[in-house]
Image (tube, helix red, strand yellow):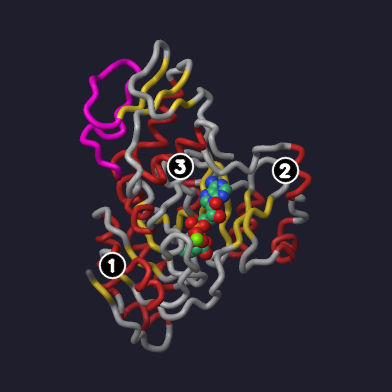
Amino acid sequence: MGVYGSDRGEGAGEFLADRQAEIEAAARALAAGGLVLLPTETVYGLGADASNPTAVAAIFEAKGRPRFNPLIAHVADVETAARIAVLDDRAMTLAKAFWPGPLTIVAPIREAAAVCDLARAGLDTVAIRVPGHPLSRAVLAAFGGPVVAPSANRSGRPSPTTFADAFGETGDKAAVALDGGPCEVGLESTVVAVLDGPPRLLRPGAVTRAQLEAVVGPLAEAENDARRSPGRLALHYAPDAPVRIDAAAPEAGEAFLAFGPWPDGERVFNLSPTGDLAEAAANLFSFLRAADRTKPVGIAVATIPGEGLGEAINDRLRRAAGYVG
Ligand code: TXA
Ligand code: MG
């Protein structure tokens, strides 16, 4: 693993010139499917190539007791963001006002392959931001594509805001760990959804509601909206077909998500023929969607072991099956 020091000179230009080798090492590690401990101005992130579901599964695995929450795609500039997401006039106004910086915009996905289904938890929307830290932006520019990165803490622990804290959480899982010094903001980015209707604040953060409203007008009243359209804030893809878990075999008309050796069949989608949980995690949301597209009477899912990533897979499946809200 590459661990790099924080002796970073004076100006940003000098800072980047000094650190070109580690920026390139980080970009190479991302391209190879590895994880990178990435400083941002808000908190440290644990990043992976957003288009690579196996790399994204490794993020969830590294965090321990994982939940498959949708992740933020980090990009180098507004142009890249607009290629990946549908940024309407309001989103562009917000982007121009606050990027690079601690604002995440949730918008419809445009280029679905750039941010894989697992990274979006199967949603048709994507959370995207241009971070303000020069080191992470340099890595994003060198890599070229979007990098998804949740906060680098292990599950249930506070977000790390220093290199030492971040390294202590998940540094052992990173192919490259970049020391960007202490995070200037120290609080996660503000998340605002720019979809139908007025922009909606999903997570308060460094950019305040007042700052947002000064630029884009009144935000949606979260409470009222939730009552008017229940379920709109649900953060996971829900299949149309009912889901039946712990199934030994599909019944007539059902699609089947298999796990381990299973004969091919018309509506059979094998999450991992070899019984590999990381592979199953990487395939989960895409295969739920693919199964749903066959318009089955239901989607039966084989028993998935509960250890490691199996915990998150089972959590997601129990929700899809309606056992958990
Ligand atoms: O400051 C930050 O935002 C840090 C740094 C590393 O960028 N990242 C971060 O990521 O806090 P994470 O994974 O801990 O939080 C992502 C937030 C969650 O609240 C998630 O629900 C929301 O973004 N989110 C992601 N995709 C979404 C989507 N499509 N729709 C709604 N919310 C989404
Ligand atoms: Mg977090």
Q: In the image, which residues are magenta?
A: 259-277
Whether residue 314 sits left or right of residue 5 in the image: it is: right
Instruction: State the residue in front, 43 or 51.
Output: 43
**Three-letter amino acid code at the position of disc 1:** Asp
Instruction: State the residue in front, 10 or 310.
Output: 310
Q: Nearer the viewer, mark 1 or mark 3?
A: 3
**Considering only order in the chain, which callout, 3 or 2, is on the residue closer to the N terminus?**
2
The quarter of the displayed image where residue 195 is located: top right
**Three-letter amino acid code at the position of disc 2:** Ala
* Mark 1 beta carbon near ligand 1 (under 8 Å): no
Q: Which residue is mark 1?
A: 172
The numbered disc on residue 315 is 3
* Residue 128 lies in the magenta stretch: no
The numbered disc on residue 20 is none
Q: CA distance from mark 2 to mark 3?
A: 24 Å
Q: Residue at x 51, y 54 (%)?
A: 128
Residue furthest top as drawn: 252
**Considering only order in the chain, which callout, 1 or 2, is on the residue closer to the N terminus?**
1
Q: Please determine whether, in this image, residue 85 is positioned above or below residue 243.
A: below
